[in-house]
Amino acid sequence: MSRMPSVALLIVSAGKGDRFGGGVPKQYRSLAGQTILRRTILALSDVADGLIQVVVGPDHLENYAAATAGLDLPMPVLGGATRQDSVRSGLESLSAKAPDFVLIHDAARPLVTHALVLRVLAALEKGVDAAIPMVAMADTLRRQNADGSWSLVPRDGIWRAQTPQGFRFAEILKAHREFKSQSVTDDMALAEAAGLSIARVDGEETNMKITTQDDLAHAERLLAGAYEFRTGSGFDVHRFTEGDHVWLCGIRIDHTHALEGHSDADAGLHALTDAILGAIGAGDIGQHFPPSDERWRNAASDRFLAHANDLLHSAGGQFVHGDVTLICERPKIGPHREAMRVRIAEILGIPLGRISVKATTTEGLGFTGRREGLAAEAVVTVKLPA
Ligand code: MG
C-alpha cells in the first residue's frame, strides 16, 4: 500500500460483567479514579485517526454517556445477545467507512499500550489477514481427570490470546457475516474458521482483562506508578467599583462595593481556573473565554472552572489539591470561607478535604491595602497519566 492504511478501532463494551459481581458492568467501574472504559478509549485515542466506535449494551447508555463525557466519539452502536453479535454490529456500522484495518478490543483491557498496538499494525502491514497478540503461559498447567487424578498439560505451544486483535477489515467482516450462526469466543476463532492467515505478535502481561475484583485491585497496583504530579499557579486582580455585592469563590457576599470585570469578576475562581489550566499546559482563562466575547459578559465564573476541570479529566487527570488565597482588607472572608470551599468542591466534584481557601491582608499597603481592588492567587496539584 503506498498510502497510509486507514485504521478503525472497535471497542466492545457490551458485556454485563457477571463474573465481577452484580450491579454496574465492570467497564463502567472506576479504576484509579476513572472508568475502565474511559481509560481504554484514552489509551487508544491516538491510534485510529479518530475512527473509534464503541459497542454498548442497550441497558447501559447512561453509563456510557457518563464514561465518555467530553470525548469526541460517534454515537455508540447497540450490542447484541453475545459478544459475537456485538462485534458484528460494530463492524457493520463501520462498513460505510471501509477502513483498511480494524482493531477489535475489549473495553475491559484498559492497560493496553501503544507499543502493543503498533506491533499488531506492523504485522497487518506485512500482509497477513489477522494479527493476534499472545503471551506465553508462565504457570504450570494441570488437568484434573474424571477420576480425580491430575495430569500435566505440556506448556509448549500454549498461548493466551489478548486484544486488540487486528484484521483486514473486509476479511473479518466477511467472516462475521458468513459464520453468523457459529458460536465462537473471539474474533480469532472466526478468522480460523474463514481460513484467514494469522500472525502471532507479542502480547503484554500488563494488558490484562479485568474480570474479577482481584483483577481490578491488580490493575490499580500496576497503575500506581504510572502517574506524574504537576503543579499550576494562578493569579488574578479585580478593581472595586460601585455596587452592593461581590462574587468570590462562587459565593455572593454583600459588600459596600462590587468588583469590576467582564464576567462576574470572581477573582478567586479565576485564579483557581488558571492554576488548573497551568497544571495541564492548556493556556489561560482569557484564551478559553476571551473578554471580547459577549457570551461571557456577566457570566458566572463557575462555568470557567468547570471547563478547566473537564479539560483536566479529558487529559486523563485528577484534581489532587487546590489552595486559594484571597488578598484584601474587605470584605471579611472568614465568615464565608467554609461556604467557598463547599462551593468549589461541588463545582470540581471533589471531596472538601482537597480544597483550601485562605485570606490575608496586606497591612494597608498597596492597592489591596487602599481597598482599590482585591487579588487572589491559587496553587493546584493534579495527577496525570505519565
Ligand atoms: Mg479575572
Image (tube, rainbow, N blue to C red):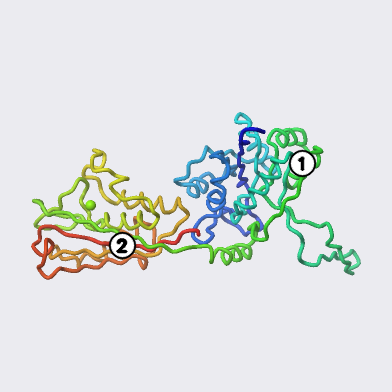
State the image quarter where residue 322 is shown: bottom left
Instruction: Work out which residue is located at the far top of the displayed protein and give it.
Output: 96
Q: What is the three-letter code of the residue carrying label 2?
A: Val
State the image quarter where residue 229 is shown: bottom left
Q: Position of residue 254 (x, y in %)?
A: 14, 57
Q: What residue is at 14 percent from the left and 68 percent from the top?
A: 362
State the image quarter where residue 83 is shown: top right
Q: Position of residue 299 (x, y in %)?
A: 24, 45
Asked whether 20 or 31 is in front, the reply is: 31
Q: Position of residue 348 (x, y in %)?
A: 36, 57
Q: CA distance from mark 1 to mark 2?
A: 55 Å
**Vertical side of 302 occupied by 360: above or below:** below
Mark 1 residue element? helix
Q: What is the three-letter code of the residue carrying label 1?
A: Leu
Q: Nearer the viewer, mark 1 or mark 2?
A: 1
Query: To which residue does mark 2 refer?
Result: 342
Query: To which residue does mark 1 refer?
Result: 190
Instruction: Work out which residue is located at the far right of the displayed protein and give it.
Output: 147
**Vertical side of 44 occupied by 236: above or below:** below
